[in-house]
Structures are given as structure tokens and as C-alpha cells.
Amino acid sequence: MRDSDWGLVVPLKPLGAAKSRLADAVADAERRALALAFAKDTVAAALAASAVRNVVVVTNDPTAARHLAALGARIVPDLPDAGLNAALEHGAAALPGRAVAALNADLPALRPAELTRVLRAARRHRRAFLPDAAGIGTTLLAARPSVPLEPAFGGASRRRHLASGAAELPSTDVPSVRRDVDTAADLRAALELGVGPMTAACLKELPTLLEELTAAAPEGTDGPGGAGRRRAAVRTSGASES
Ligand SMILES: Nc1nc2c(ncn2[C@@H]2O[C@H](COP(=O)(O)OP(=O)(O)OP(=O)(O)O)[C@@H](O)[C@H]2O)c(=O)[nH]1
Ligand SMILES: C=C(OP(=O)(O)O)C(=O)O
């Protein structure tokens, strides 16, 4: 298997239903726009990773499908009401005989070089996964060619993926691959890593939210040396592995 042989499967809910845990922080139209921006930054960074040959997005959302196809992703329509894991198996079936990795669509800080590092580590195993930033869920699950993906995403999936025999990949030095965004606090953490250009542009249109996210965290929740106003790091390009 060559380094650049991975096929990625990125699942995406209809935008109207996506990222429901951001509903407290933003209005519906803005939540949809953010979900699309996260997916575009995720897919653009994945396509820029040297370990990735192609990206299949499983979605029934026509707007997202149009935007993500324009970036170079192949769109596979979702199965009706089958859920996330069925969607991933359906997407993996579109990549027969390939090494396949499922990657969440909510990784707006994703860096191509970090994704390549994770996929290189995954090549050593039949099946392998990367825990999310919270250490409870999963952001990436990979399987060698002809090995069934057997996805068990949703909630506390780290435990399920371990129990299924998948190897847990080293999680140091790949923070952008682990940084899924479900809540406003997650978005704050992604901003600190540096989000991609689509998410940055979307947040620029939401100055009140951006102000809240980059303001000092409440006392006791700030990280080491983090007192005072936080700086939002924004990447200007998602298309380079350097
Ligand atoms: N195609 C497809 N993707 C899904 C489905 N359910 C979840 N996803 C995607 O799976 C990934 C992980 O899901 P979550 O982190 O729960 O994202 P979410 O469902 O948008 O977020 P919440 O509404 O807050 O639960 C995201 O990229 C979702 O868009 C599904 O039934 N079909
Ligand atoms: C999809 C997952 O979790 P969440 O819905 O919490 O993002 C997961 O980590 O498997």
C-alpha cells in the first residue's frame, strides 16, 4: 500500500439538522452556515493531505453536496434514515479494495500534515482509530484494504472502537485531527488552534459570536497563562501540507 492510497469517507447530516449543540450560541441560519463552513474546511484540508487520494462525502444535503463537489469531493447520497454508521459503511462501499478512513465533517482546524501523520500511523494496523479531543469519542477510524471498517461512532465511541479490536493511534502532535466542534466551547478551542478559511470567513460575519469566543474564559476555566483576552488564530489557507 502506497502512502497516498487512502480514500476518506466524510459523513454529513442535512445542514438543517447538523451541529444542533450550537443552537444555544447562534440562530438557525448561522448554525447551518457554520456546519457547512466546518465541512468545507475539513474536506479541503483532507484533499490537501498527501496521504489522501480521494474524499467521498456521504450526504443528502443538496447545498453541501454542491459546495463539497466543487472542492473535489465525490458525493454519495445518504441512505434514508439509516444513521451515521450505516452512512459510513455505505460510503466505504464506494471505495472497494481501498484503504478507507472515516473522518468527521466537523474538524474546522484540520491540518493536512497532521492528517497524513495519523494515516501513516494507521497503516501499521488492520483497523485503527483516533480519539476526539475530549477523549470520549472518535474523529477518525481507518481500515486497511479489504478489512471491514465496522464503524461504531456516536457518543462514547472511543470505548466501543477499542472493544472492537481497533488500535488506538497516538494522539500527541495531531490536535487538529482530534478537534471536533460540537459546542461553542469546542469552537473556541478550534479558534485557538487556527481554523480554516471558510470557518474564519463565516465567523467574520458573526462579530458578536466571535467576540464572545475570543474574550477571556470565565475564571477557573482558562488554560495555563491564558488570562486576559484570547487571540483567535485563523489559517488563511487550507491547501498546503506545510
Ligand atoms: N451522512 C450522515 N452523516 C451523519 C449522520 N449523523 C451524523 N452525521 C455526521 O457525522 C459526524 C459526527 O456527528 P456529530 O458530531 O454528532 O455531528 P452533528 O450530528 O452535526 O452534531 P449534533 O447535532 O450536535 O449531534 C458529523 O460530520 C455529522 O454531520 C447521518 O445520519 N448521516
Ligand atoms: C460522532 C461522535 O460523537 P459526537 O456526536 O459526540 O460528536 C463520535 O465521537 O463517535
Image: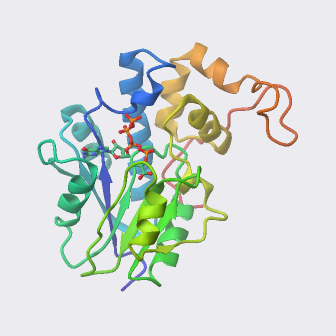
Quadrant for residue 146, please give it. Answer: bottom left
Quarter of the figure with the N terminus: bottom left
Whether residue 48 is visible here, answered yes or no, is no
Residue 240 screen position, x and y as percent = 52, 56
**Hey, which residue is sitting farthest left in the picture?**
80
Q: Is residue 141 above or below residue 4?
A: above
Residue at 56%, 48% in the rendered image = 179
Quarter, ligand 1: top left
Residue at 34%, 60% in the rendered image = 152
Q: Could you say which is closer to the camera, residue 31 or residue 151?
A: 151
Residue 41 screen position, x and y as percent = 44, 43
Q: Could you say which is closer to the camera, residue 84 or residue 59?
A: 84
Q: Is residue 148 above or below residue 34?
A: below
Total number of numbered discs in the rendering: 0
Color style of the picture: rainbow
Residue at 52%, 51% in the rendered image = 110
Would you say 59 lies left or right of 161 here? left
Whether residue 162 is visible here, answered yes or no, is yes
Q: Is residue 217 above or below residue 208?
A: below
Residue 34 screen position, x and y as percent = 43, 29
Quarter of the figure with the C terminus: bottom right
Residue 46 screen position, x and y as percent = 42, 57
Residue at 61%, 22% in the rendered image = 210
